[in-house]
Image (cartoon, helix red, strand yellow):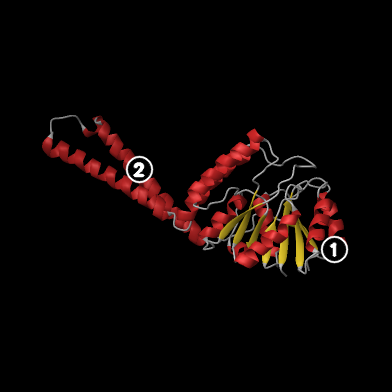
Amino acid sequence: MQISVVIPLYNEEDSLIELHEKIISNLENFLIDYEIIFIDDGSIDSSWSVIKNLCSSSKKTKGVQFLKNYGKSMALSEGFKLAKGKIVITMDADLQDDPKEIIPLYKMITENNYDIVSGWKKKRYDSLIFKNLPSKLFNFAARLSSGISLNDFNCGIKAYKSDVIKEIELTSGMHRYIPVLAKKSGFHKIAEKIVKHHPRVHGNTKYGPDRFIKGFLDLITLSFFSRFGKRPMHFFGLFGTLILVVGFFFSIYLGIDKLFINTTGRLITERPEFYISLASMIIGSQFFLTGFLGELILRNSKKAKNYKIKSRLNYE
């Protein structure tokens, strides 16, 4: 199989039939074996009924229904696991991503040997204040911290080599940073393509301005875990040891000063330096123990699915 189109969705009943028809009409013109995978992230409208009908009309269309809404990252994670295509294309289900971009994205990877080609919605049909400006700030911060020159990290339409999406592991909220995760895993050939962006026709956006705040927090989390996720002792242990050592030597100085230098001065417990050294040793010990416990948890933890699947269609 050459192309897998993975489409996460939540309450998009009015868009699915049109989207499905557009994808098929664009792909059928090429001699390409493909599949379309709809991941219903716990929709509460009739999206799953529409997907059932689409799957019954075409064996190339497959569906997965989550028990409840787990978020886009989990939906993409399941889609990546099921995808059989050599190239995986992701796109949103709201008809704002253009299915005509699938083949150009596919060709960019196959002809130029890119690992990832990310879409760039250069001309957007979204709110200037609530989406465009926050998006620019978010993308600037992501470029600065990751070193990846992408203008639109959060664009829904992207193309990946199968090796890339099988290697990375998505946790909640990290779908925005798949290029960053891929780079950390050793996939450095990342390109960008300007894609068409259409105004939303049906329904309402599922994301508010708060998604950018969450995005910044996820960026901080990703930055920390990419450096210390597998060795928390390197962070907590280092700081804990430094603070503990500073407090310890400070207390030794206070003891020597009281016993041999300024024997008639104030009691040690009456000096503010004593409490500073005591607090430093306590905080340092806590940091060190946090790193130690983190190592124990990491080495003994078992990975489990963060979502539950209710139904599958066209899967044996």
Question: Callout 1 environment at 10 Å: few (<14), some (14 to 19), or many (20+)?
Answer: few
Relative vertical location of residue 30 with respect to residue 292 in this rendering, above or below: below
Q: Is residue 22 above or below residue 218?
A: below
First in sequence: mark 1 or mark 2? 1
**Picture coordinates of residue 224, whole percent (x, y):** 47, 50
- Residue type at the position of mark 2: Ile
Residue nearest the observer in this picture, 41 or 252: 41
Quadrant position of residue 53: bottom right
- Residue positioned 71% across, 68% down in the render: 2
Residue drawn at x 83%, y 65% is: 59
On residue 238, which mark appears? none
* Label 2 crowd bin: few (<14), some (14–19), many (20+), radius 10 Å: some
* Local SS, label 2: helix
Residue 193 position within the rendered picture, expressed as x and y whole percent measured from the top left: 63, 54
Residue identified by numbered label 1: 58
Residue 310 in the image: x percent, y percent? 76, 56
Decide which of 98, 247 is in the foreground and name it.
Answer: 98
Residue 191 location (% of width, % of height): 58, 57
- Quadrant of the snapshot with the C terminus: bottom right
Residue 40 visible in image: no
Residue on which the image places disc 2: 282
User: The N terminus appears in which quarter of the rendering?
Assistant: bottom right
